[in-house]
Image (tube, rainbow, N blue to C red):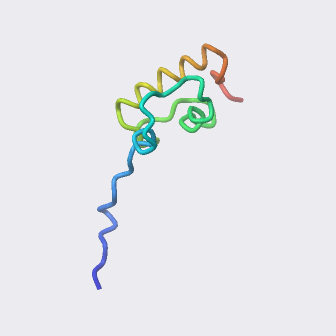
């Protein structure tokens, strides 16, 4: 019986790359909320497992949605 090494795990793929989403839309609030913490802060790339290109798009989309009052700046 071969044992699998727990240290070698399959790398988690980016949510947007996996679902074939090329452009992160600021109007799609349901997707944007997945990448906000409980205090409405943008989640870090290490924690959200999003690739660098999509993290940049995600950040600008969240900031744009906040200005348009679709997302809160701070959650109480």
Q: Which residue appears at 62% of the width and 35% of the height?
A: 30
Q: Relative to the observer, which residue lies in front, 5 or 52?
A: 52
* Position of residue 16 in the picture relative to residue 67 (left or right): left
In which quadrant of the rendered image does the C terminus lie? top right
* Position of residue 70 in the picture relative to residue 12 (left or right): right
Residue 56 rendering spot, x and y as whole percentages: 40, 25
Placement of 2 over or under 34, stated as above or below: below
Q: Which residue appears at 48% of the width and 28% of the height?
A: 24
- Name which quarter of the figure residue 6 lies in: bottom left
Residue 4 rendering spot, x and y as whole percentages: 31, 73
Query: In the displayed image of the protein, which residue is found farthest to the right?
Result: 76
In which quadrant of the rendered image does the N terminus lie? bottom left
Residue 39 rendering spot, x and y as whole percentages: 63, 32
Residue 20 rendering spot, x and y as whole percentages: 42, 39
Q: Which residue appears at 38% of the width and 51% of the height?
A: 12
Query: In the displayed image of the protein, which residue is found farthest to the top?
Result: 67
Q: Relative to the observer, which residue lies in front, 12 or 45?
A: 12
């Amino acid at each position: 019986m071969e044992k699998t090494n727990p240290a070698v795990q399959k790398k988690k793929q980016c949510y947007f790359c996996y679902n074939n989403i090329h452009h992160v839309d600021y109007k799609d609030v349901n997707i944007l909320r997945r990448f906000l913490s409980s205090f409405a802060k943008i989640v870090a790339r290490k924690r959200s497992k999003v690739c660098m290109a999509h993290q940049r798009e995600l950040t600008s989309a969240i900031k744009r949605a906040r200005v348009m009052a679709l997302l809160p700046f701070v959650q109480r």
